[in-house]
Image: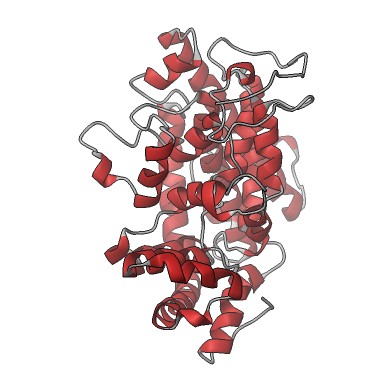
């Protein structure tokens, strides 16, 4: 739903027929007067950037815990890289780059401290109470937990941005998946504001999702090299990466090691981006869509790597999994931070008075163990790495770092 006449007079991006059209947005759950100067998707992007949850991403883990080094990616720098490459691909394909960017900027808002380790621990702890999923938590943040506006909870984002956040990786219903399989927090919101979970998302959201893959494939190589988990010579044995190093050596023989690495890895990045643009264009041509809804109704995702590139990326991911994500030093740190969350969660469950004053009102209305657990999960998931460590030090007596 929307209210008021849109006052902005033009939209200058070259738009394909299958692009999301901000002039035809399905609106917001809570009707608002339209902006005179910004489209609905531009407003969504800006609200996400100004949210508290977005700011907290600067102190949340990507792979390495936030305080381990100033040059490693955090969840925020990862998000910005995703948004940059997503916007580039959206423009090349004639899509709405503002919607693409909004979905990209919001895609990791629901991550708890300590990256995927934190998510695994919260999923384990919340299993008796409906589970925990970072994508569903992102929806909960932008629809409920951000509480700054006078007329509504959340950010009141447009339907298209919420749809993209919910199902950028594909349909969540159909093909044997029932509503009972949905994360409870997502099912709860969908009951209020139908996000059409049985269809694909817009192509803008699909592009944001594959931009995530491109970004972490590339920057994990950078960070793993910086951490000394593997060498340039070792990754140069991989397809795609080896091709890039060879191209640099042919063009710049004798280049110093730092510049050689940068030149090679930016070629890896570029090759993945160009491949997605090419393959997505081929799939669009084969489908012949006339509208964004034709993209949603397609049998397959439109945004994709070619089969040749996908095969190379499988080998790259297998290497990173073995040499980086499961490296002994990384696993040791993962075990340490997992214990931080395993200690904090039951503390708050057993003594909710330990929660901050502004969270105390939620305790009174929780009404059940499941509701209390969801409240505690919301609080713990919102923590930054350093705040979680500081709280653990204060409440448990561990070796916390940083400030709350």
Q: How is the image coloured?
A: secondary structure
Any part of residue 246 in sight:
no
Any part of residue 115 in sight:
yes
In the image, is 275 to the left or to the right of 43?
left
Q: Residue at x 65, y 60 (%)?
A: 56
**Which of the pair 110/289 is nearer the observer?**
110
Q: Residue furthest bottom?
A: 397
Task: Quadrant for residue 225, please give it.
Answer: bottom right
Task: Quadrant for residue 315, please give it.
Answer: top left
Rendered location of residue 49, percent (x, y): 70, 46
Q: Residue at x 42, y 10 (%)?
A: 286
In the image, is 180 to the left or to the right of 322?
left
**Which of the pair 3/331 is nearer the observer?**
3
Rendered location of residue 157, percent (x, y): 59, 37
In the image, is 82 to the left or to the right of 293?
right
Q: Is residue 104 above or below residue 64?
A: above
Q: Is residue 345 above or below residue 9?
A: below
Q: What is the quadrant of the C terminus in the image?
A: bottom right
In the image, is 194 to the left or to the right of 139?
left
Q: Residue at x 47, y 14 (%)?
A: 284
**Labels in figure, total:** 0
Rendered location of residue 341, percent (x, y): 46, 75
Q: Residue furthest left?
A: 176
Q: Residue at x 62, y 48 (%)?
A: 79
Task: Quadrant for residue 158, please give it.
Answer: top right
**Which of the pair 173/289 is nearer the observer?**
173
Q: Is residue 16 above or below residue 34?
A: above
Rendered location of residue 148, percent (x, y): 67, 53
Q: What is the quadrant of the N terminus in the image?
A: top right
């Amino acid at each position: 739903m929307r209210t008021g006449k849109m006052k902005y007079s033009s939209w200058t991006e070259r738009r394909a027929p299958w692009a999301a059209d901000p002039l035809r947005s399905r609106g917001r759950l809570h009707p608002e007067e339209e902006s005179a100067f910004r489209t609905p998707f531009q407003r969504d992007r800006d609200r996400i950037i100004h949210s508290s949850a977005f700011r907290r991403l600067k102190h949340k883990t990507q792979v390495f815990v936030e305080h381990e080094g100033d040059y490693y990616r955090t969840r925020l720098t990862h998000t910005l890289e995703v948004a940059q490459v997503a916007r580039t691909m959206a423009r090349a394909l004639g899509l709405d780059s503002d919607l693409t960017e909004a979905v990209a900027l919001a895609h990791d808002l629901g991550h708890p401290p300590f990256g995927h380790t934190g998510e695994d621990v919260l999923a384990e702890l919340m299993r008796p109470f409906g589970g925990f999923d970072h994508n569903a938590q992102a929806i909960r943040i932008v629809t409920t937990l951000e509480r700054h506006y006078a007329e509504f909870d959340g950010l009141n984002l447009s339907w298209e941005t919420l749809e993209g956040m919910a199902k950028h990786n594909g349909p969540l219903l159909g093909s044997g998946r029932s509503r009972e399989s949905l994360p409870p927090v997502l099912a709860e919101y969908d009951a209020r504001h139908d996000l059409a979970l049985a269809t694909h998302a817009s192509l803008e959201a699909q592009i944001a999702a594959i931009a995530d893959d491109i970004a972490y494939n590339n920057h994990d190589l950078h960070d793993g090299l910086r951490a000394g988990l593997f060498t340039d010579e070792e990754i140069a044995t991989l397809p795609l990466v080896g091709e890039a190093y060879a191209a640099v050596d042919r063009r710049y023989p004798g280049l110093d090691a730092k510049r050689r690495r940068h030149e090679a890895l930016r070629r890896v990045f570029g090759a993945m981006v160009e491949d997605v643009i090419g393959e997505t264009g081929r799939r669009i041509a084969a489908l012949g869509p006339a509208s964004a809804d034709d993209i949603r109704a397609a049998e397959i995702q439109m945004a994709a790597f070619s089969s040749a590139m996908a095969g190379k990326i499988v080998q790259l991911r297998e290497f990173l999994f073995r040499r980086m994500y499961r490296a002994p030093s990384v696993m040791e740190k993962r075990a340490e931070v997992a214990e931080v969350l395993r200690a904090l969660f039951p503390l708050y469950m057993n003594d909710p008075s330990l929660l901050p004053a502004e969270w105390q009102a939620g305790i009174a209305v929780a009404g059940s163990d499941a509701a209390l657990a969801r409240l505690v999960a919301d609080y713990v998931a919102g923590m930054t790495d350093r705040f979680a460590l500081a709280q653990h030090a204060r409440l448990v007596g561990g070796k916390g770092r940083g400030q709350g």
